[in-house]
Image (cartoon, rainbow, N blue to C red):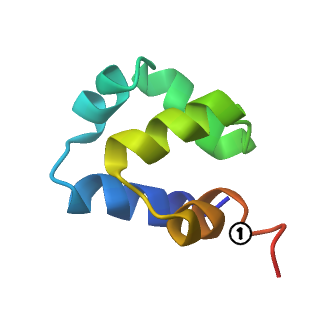
């Protein structure tokens, strides 16, 4: 997972991190834990994708950066 790229998209879309987290129904602590452990559920990835209006390429480069070569 590319945490920095996700944080870039959050800021690029004009959100503060705490506002973003509450908008997707996740606590700030839970979000950082999931970023650290690379443990986002598919349903959470989908929610983030829709909220930030990410493309499939964006999603792949953020969440599957270590898998896709």
* Nearest to the observer: residue 46 or residue 62: 46
In the rendered image, the vertical position of residue 30 relative to residue 38, given as above or below: above
The single residue placed furthest to the bottom in the displayed view is 69
Residue at the spot 35% in from the left edge and 60% down from the top edge? 9
Whole-percent x and y of residue 40?
A: 67, 36
Quadrant of residue 57 within the rendered picture = bottom right
The answer to whether residue 33 of the structure is visible from this angle is: no
Q: Position of residue 36 (x, y in %)?
A: 65, 44
Q: Name the residue at the left extreme.
A: 14
Residue 25, quarter of picture: top left
Q: Is 33 on the left-hand or right-hand side of 20?
A: right
The percent coordinates of residue 46 (x first, y second) are: 56, 38
Whether residue 58 sits left or right of residue 18 in the image: it is: right
User: Which residue is at a point 30% across and 34% down the rendered structure image?
Assistant: 20
Residue 11 visible in the snapshot: yes
Percent from the top left, x then y, of residue 31?
Answer: 51, 31
Task: Tell how many labels.
Answer: 1
Q: Which residue is mark 1?
A: 65
Relative to 14, say whether 69 is above or below.
below
């Amino acid at each position: 997972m590319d945490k920095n790229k996700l944080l870039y998209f959050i800021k690029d879309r004009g959100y503060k991190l705490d506002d973003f987290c509450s908008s997707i129904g996740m606590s700030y602590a839970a979000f950082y834990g999931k970023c650290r452990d690379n443990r986002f559920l598919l349903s959470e990835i989908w929610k983030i994708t829709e909220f930030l209006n990410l493309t499939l390429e964006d999603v792949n480069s953020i969440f599957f950066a270590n898998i896709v070569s």
